[in-house]
Image (cartoon, helix red, strand yellow):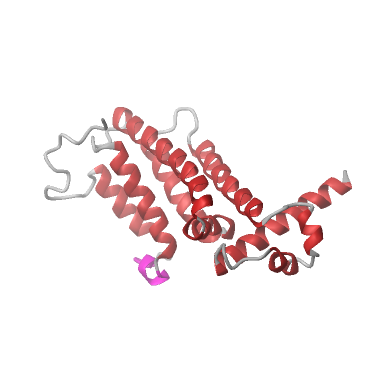
Amino acid sequence: MAQQERARRTREKALTAAAEVFASHGYSRTTLSEVAERIGMTKGALYGHFPSKSSLARALIDESRQAWASLRTEYDTPGADAEGVLEGVVVNFADRLRSDVRLRATVRIAADCPVLARTLADVLTEVQNALMELIRRAQRDSGFPPYSPRLVANLLMTVTYGVLYAPAACLESDGAHDGEPLWRLLFGALSGSGVTGSGRGDGRGVSDP
């Protein structure tokens, strides 16, 4: 049991170290030797846990899928308001992207490695489909405006990943430093609360094919 725990801790250290190097240097410039050195291991010992650089990257991508799933489980509880669930999972996933180097690394990996980008694209498709489901539920149960669920999901994903690269000063407003005013504005505009003018078009919305 003690040996299994040591192996688990070593694996966690390796993933964090790899994520730090991926996020800093990119996939192509990362080496297993650099990851091993970062945690005081030999390259051979690291091979016992991850036989290749791509296996490290794939493990991080798998974690990004699990991170999304855990947030969905945390917020989407029985009887929860769908619009509140939608906002909760999006805002908290964006916060995780900014604070969790493992999640940030997956974004850099996707930009640097086309083969692995396809794997991450599968994860993003899962996220998009989950958001569309929540949007449809919010439209049905919470009075969310009848925009195209796909269009709203794409907007939310674009802003989520854009916030990751936004300078800190862009997220500071009204004394907040975590982008909360930005999210309030976005979700307020989407829901129609406090929005004036013709921002919602003719009110008919757009349906998915």
| Residue 24, image x, y percentages | 56, 69
In the rendered picture of this protein, how many numbered marks are placed on residues? 0
**In which quadrant of the rendered image does the N terminus lie?**
top right
Residue 121 higher or lower than 107, as above or below: above
Q: Is residue 79 left or right of residue 4?
A: left
Residue 67 higher or lower than 32, as above or below: above
| Residue at (77, 53) in percent of width and height | 9
| Residue at (50, 47) in percent of width and height | 120
Residue 170 in magenta stretch: yes
Residue 79 in view, yes or no: yes
Q: Nearer the viewer, residue 32 or 5?
A: 32
- Residue 29: name its quadrant: bottom right
| Residue 118, image x, y percentages | 48, 47
| Residue at (45, 44) in percent of width and height | 124
| Residue 147, image x, y percentages | 24, 38
| Residue 152, image x, y percentages | 30, 43
Q: Which of 144 and 207 is in front in this view?
A: 207
Residue 196 in magenta stretch: no
Residue 179 in view, yes or no: no
| Residue at (24, 45) in percent of width and height | 193
Region in magenta: 167-175
Q: Residue furthest front?
A: 115
Q: Nearer the viewer, residue 84 or 203?
A: 203
**In which quadrant of the rendered image does the C terminus lie?**
top left
